[in-house]
Image (cartoon, helix red, strand yellow):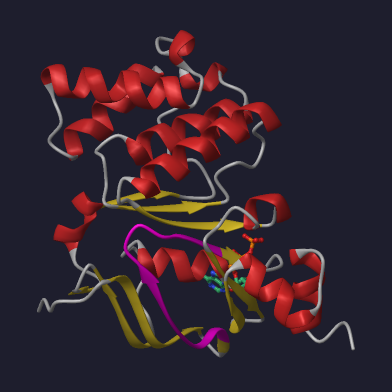
Amino acid sequence: MTHESSSCVEIRDVIRNFGEKIVIERISLRVERGEIFGLLGPSGSGKTTLVKMLAGIDEATSGEISLLGVKLPKLAMMNRIGYMAQSDALYAELSAQENLSFFGSLFELGGARLKERIHYAMKLVGLEEHLNRIVSEYSGGMKRRLSLAIALLHEPEVLILDEPTVGIDPILRKSIWNELEALSAAGTTIIVTTHVMDEADKCHRLGMIRDGKLIAIGSPTDLKTRTGSSTIEEAFLHYGGERP
Ligand SMILES: Nc1ncnc2c1ncn2[C@@H]1O[C@H](COP(=O)(O)OP(=O)(O)OP(=O)(O)O)[C@@H](O)[C@H]1O
């Protein structure tokens, strides 16, 4: 079922349990089209679990998630989503070029268009010189960058990135963020999980997650102003109850 909405993502009363364990505890939020929305929270707080449901590869125990007006999970939405997981899903024995061609073919990309997209994505992540190398020879950071290139390849309307810049040096991290900002300005919605506070500051809005609960939501400036904090880290500690 589709319906008109200006929101890109609508999460309504989502709960995710693993056995007895409640990992996501009734979260509701919206992400607007073209927004860079950050999910910030400590290790184990539920960020990956939440983005997997947004990417349609896991399902809520209860509640609803809609993406671009379509209720998830829905296989047909995969074409419209670019998902970069925390662990790289690459074929180590193949070259980067072969990995990109394989993932491109899943999205029905071929010929000149595929070539153009591979060039764009590999340039963006600074790997254009390493296109023909076997992935098993890549460093950890290079694998992260290749995973990001793959997520971007089919020009998805929604990019879901789970800690995309871990293991990436500050200069390249900056150029990746510049490009994410340009993509967002051109209408792509970007949902990104992060531990890195300066990245959190670059998001248009942030959702702070702790123990599976959304403890605060707003722009970085709002969150800091509301808590009288000078940094996002301080604001997080305030909402987390670790500061009076
Ligand atoms: N398949 C699963 N079965 C059981 N427990 C799970 C499963 N997946 C995640 N969990 C648990 O859910 C909680 C949240 O994990 P999740 O990976 O979503 O956290 P995170 O905020 O992404 O952490 P990190 O920043 O370390 O990646 C953890 O306690 C984790 O052990």
Queried whether the magenta region covers residue 23, the answer comes back as yes
Which portion, as a residue range, is magenta? 22-38
Front in this rendered view, residue 195 or 58 = 195
On the image, the x and y values in percent for residue 214 come to 58, 82
On the image, the x and y values in percent for residue 120 come to 34, 23
Residue 176 as seen in the image, left or right of residue 59: right
Queried whether the magenta region covers residue 21, the answer comes back as no
Decide: is 218 above or below 202: below
Residue 48 as seen in the image, left or right of residue 131: right
Secondary structure mostly taken by the magenta-highlighted segment of the chain: strand
For image coordinates 35% across by 68% down, the residue present is: 32
Decide: is 96 above or below 235: above
For image coordinates 37% across by 47% down, the residue present is: 185
Q: Quadrant of residue 74?
A: bottom left
Residue 77 as seen in the image, left or right of residue 159: left
Decide: is 166 above or below 17: above
For image coordinates 75% across by 73% down, the residue present is: 236
- Quadrant of the frame with the N terminus: bottom left
Q: Quadrant of residue 44?
A: bottom right
Decide: is 13 above or below 99: below
